[in-house]
């Protein structure tokens, strides 16, 4: 009988298949770890009460959250950048918006270059004409304190001469495969503090925008607990027990006057 010819195994093909399988396994394991970590955050913090708010007094009857108790009232607002496109500020004011935080600038997550938001001036003029309270924020990708200070100086230069009554915001967030991805919590905390200290040197009030994940894993809370906090969490009630001034509670807000979905925020105001 004629013997069948043995099939030749190509090492390169085998290696390629193994690499693909390893990559897939890595993604699955990472997703599982992230999910478990997120769940652990809620388990660690969700039972803690807020420092001075009674969440039973939240009211959504107007289509956005309001709050009222013996010591506090609230204001409704949004945060915007060039990604939100055309905005009719008179219309959003009619919809109940009382304040806006406008992105003034940002640092590239890969290049590290400083950039001005393309609609910064346009949004500022529109919000000002509509009589809205205005604040500005900077999207940071600082890898060290020197860059954080540079960002603060850049933001101060952008808002110089403008009329606004809300703080300047340090918005420090991870960006997929960005330049801050590997930074440890100590460095991230130091960068945030350096930015806000520099903003204060320019005689502006600063505030830190952050979320539960960063507070749990990336910031040293004892070093930022006394800062003014703008807390982001898309949940029925916020799960951060320490003082905060603003709560970003939705990224799916819809308003007449803005084509794109927008972040909804509630500001707590002491009477």
Image (tube, helix red, strand yellow):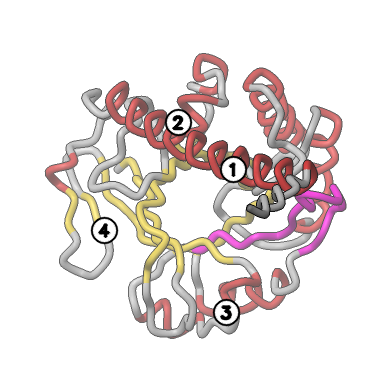
Instruction: Point out which mark residue 129 bears.
Output: 3
Quadrant in which the C terminus appears: top left
Disc 4 + disc 2, Cβ < 8 Å? no
Circles 1 and 4, Cβ within 8 Å, touching? The answer is no
Q: Earlier in the sequence, mark 2 or mark 1?
A: 1
- Residue at 46%, 25% in the rendered image: 216
Q: Which of pointers 1 and 4 indicates the residue nearer the eye?
A: 1
Range drawn in magenta = 100-116
Image point 33% across, 41% down: which residue?
Answer: 270
Whether residue 155 is visible, yes or no, is no
* Residue for badge 2: 33
Q: Mark 1 vs mark 4: which is more N-terminal?
A: 1
Q: Which mark is residue 21?
A: 1
Q: Quadrant of residue 87?
A: bottom right
Of the numbered discs 4 and 3, the one sitting upstream in the chain is: 4
Distance of mark 4 from mark 2, alpha carbons?
33 Å
């Amino acid at each position: 009988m004629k013997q069948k010819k043995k099939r030749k195994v190509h090492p390169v093909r085998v290696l390629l298949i193994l690499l693909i399988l390893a990559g897939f396994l890595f993604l699955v394991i990472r997703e599982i770890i992230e999910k478990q970590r997120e769940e652990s955050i809620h388990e660690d913090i969700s039972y803690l009460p807020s420092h001075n708010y009674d969440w039973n007094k939240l009211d959504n009857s107007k289509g956005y959250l309001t709050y009222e108790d013996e010591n506090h009232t609230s204001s409704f607002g949004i945060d915007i950048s060039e990604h939100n496109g055309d905005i009719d500020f008179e219309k959003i004011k009619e919809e109940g918006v009382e304040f806006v935080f406008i992105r003034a600038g940002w640092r590239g997550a890969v290049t590290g270059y400083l950039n001005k938001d393309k609609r910064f001036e346009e949004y500022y003029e529109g919000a000002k004409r509509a009589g809205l309270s205005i604040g500005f924020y900077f999207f940071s990708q600082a890898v060290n304190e020197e860059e954080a200070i540079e960002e603060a100086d850049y933001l101060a230069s952008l808002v110089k001469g403008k009329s606004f009554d809300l703080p300047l915001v340090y918005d420090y967030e991870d960006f997929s495969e960005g330049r801050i991805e590997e930074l440890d919590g100590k460095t991230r905390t130091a960068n945030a503090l350096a930015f806000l200290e520099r903003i204060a040197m320019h005689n502006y009030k600063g505030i830190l925008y952050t979320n539960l994940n960063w507070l749990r894993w990336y910031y040293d809370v004892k070093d930022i607990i006394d800062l003014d906090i703008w807390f982001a969490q898309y949940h029925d009630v916020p799960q951060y027990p320490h003082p905060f001034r603003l709560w970003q509670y939705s990224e799916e807000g819809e308003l007449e006057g803005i084509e794109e979905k927008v972040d909804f925020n509630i500001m707590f105001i002491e009477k």
